[in-house]
Image (spheres, rainbow, N blue to C red):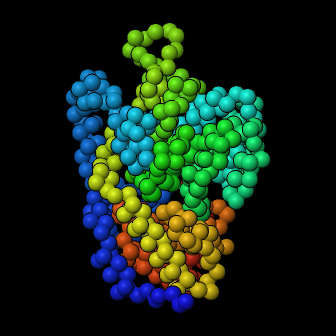
Amino acid sequence: MTAQTHTFQTVQQMDANDPLAHLRDRFDLPADTIYLDGNSLGALPKGVMERLQKAVVQEWGQGLIRSWNTADWYPAPQRTGSAIARLIGANNDEVVVCDSTSVNLYKVMVGALRMRPDRKIIVSEQGNFPTDVYINAEVAQMMGYELRCVAPEDVEKAIEEAGTDLAAVQLTHVHYKTGRIYDMAGITAKAQELGGLVVWDLAHSAGALPVDLNGCNADFAIGCGYKYLNGGPGAPAFVFVASRHLADMHQPLTGWHGHAKPFEFTQGFEPHAKIDKMLTGTASQLGLITLESALGVFADVDMTALRTKNMQLGDLFIALVEQELAGMNFDLASPRNSENRGSQVSLTHADGYPIMQALIARGVIGDFRTPDILRFGFAAPYVQFIDIWNAVRHLREIMETGEWDQPKFKTRQAVT
Ligand SMILES: *Cc1c(COP(=O)(O)O)cnc(C)c1O
């Protein structure tokens, strides 16, 4: 089988046939930039600036403290959670937005382990995102559990080996480096058969793929507001607790916003009966308002169509890398089959860091993950097929001319 040869014209035609092409107009993107890093920081949706301006000038500046009631600030964590629920296959009252992904992971892990006090083992992945690894290790040590981190292909075996000692499994649904997708339904079922609970990190899934938490009978999940959900730098995160577990969930950060009656100011902690129990303290209100406004982008979007497009973008990228960059020592670090790959493609190259810096200098923005991974994210709402064509063309020019091989591209910056 010979692969189809792509040309500028055939790729242009893909944009002309794209049923989601109109979504790009919902974003303010800088001219002359090809943005392939929406998996790290989503782009700015139009209208967010105006919403934030109103929140600062009117709601804060004029409304002052009254705005907790009059501008409906107080219910924003639940309201924003409901907007995310649709994207991840949850019920509206199972998701709330608060704190960071890391903090929510801590809350959920401790809560999950408290539900399995007589069991000993946590299964996770070697190479999971560092925050997940660090928090799992700390929680395991603090609570007296054994953390087993294994290679992705050994996760199911490790679950079986843990047997009835399995307390919890914690995995990132779409791997941050490779984009590899775990079988959420299969792993959840396998762990639950043994009586274990599963905590899914949806940082690279929410807003990128149609996640079906309740369809998979998921227990708990957490995820990120500033990646594919476009909530802005450091946007608050979300947490999902299946309604069947709400009564038994005792999360450890018992702040006043998780109390049954915060404004009674009582001394004893009594957890809220609903998802509100996952809250801790006062919301980062401007961050919440930004995220809620940004989610408007998804209001009428069919996640299946969006997923189809990001699979096609990834397939095109891989095909063009093979067509245009043969013999330049790039290797594919992501699954080739788009069904098994999230909304990103990673390449490896020994000179990955300076190559990515040279690309960024040309306005093609991806990112680098140590030791040798060039990561390209394809946020389907605003990435065009022609962007992929142009990105690979730039990459080829950088390689052919040796443009990447300059000292200025080799100094590591704080954020890669
Ligand atoms: C991005 C990411 C996070 C981010 O956590 P923060 O608390 O927002 O810094 C967590 N987990 C995974 C898998 C991620 O990719």
Which residue: 44% across, 71% down?
Answer: 313
Dividing the picture into quadrants, the one containing residue 349 is: bottom right
* Quadrant showing the N terminus: bottom right
Which residue: 50% across, 15% down?
Answer: 270
In this figure, what is the number of numbered marks?
0
- Which one is in front, 217 or 376? 217
Name above or below for residue 168 compared with residue 373: above
Name above or below for residue 250 compared with residue 134: above
Which residue: 43% across, 47% down?
Answer: 89
| Residue 243 in view (yes/no) | yes
- Which one is in front, 138 or 212? 212
- Which one is in front, 172 or 47? 172
Percent position (x, y) of residue 117?
A: 70, 27
| Residue 176 in view (yes/no) | no
Which residue: 48% across, 71% down?
Answer: 314
Percent position (x, y) of residue 149?
A: 73, 49
Percent position (x, y) of residue 178?
A: 60, 63
Name above or below for residue 218 compared with residue 59: below
Judged left or right of residue 355, residue 215 is left
* Quadrant showing the C terminus: bottom right
Percent position (x, y) of residue 94?
A: 44, 36
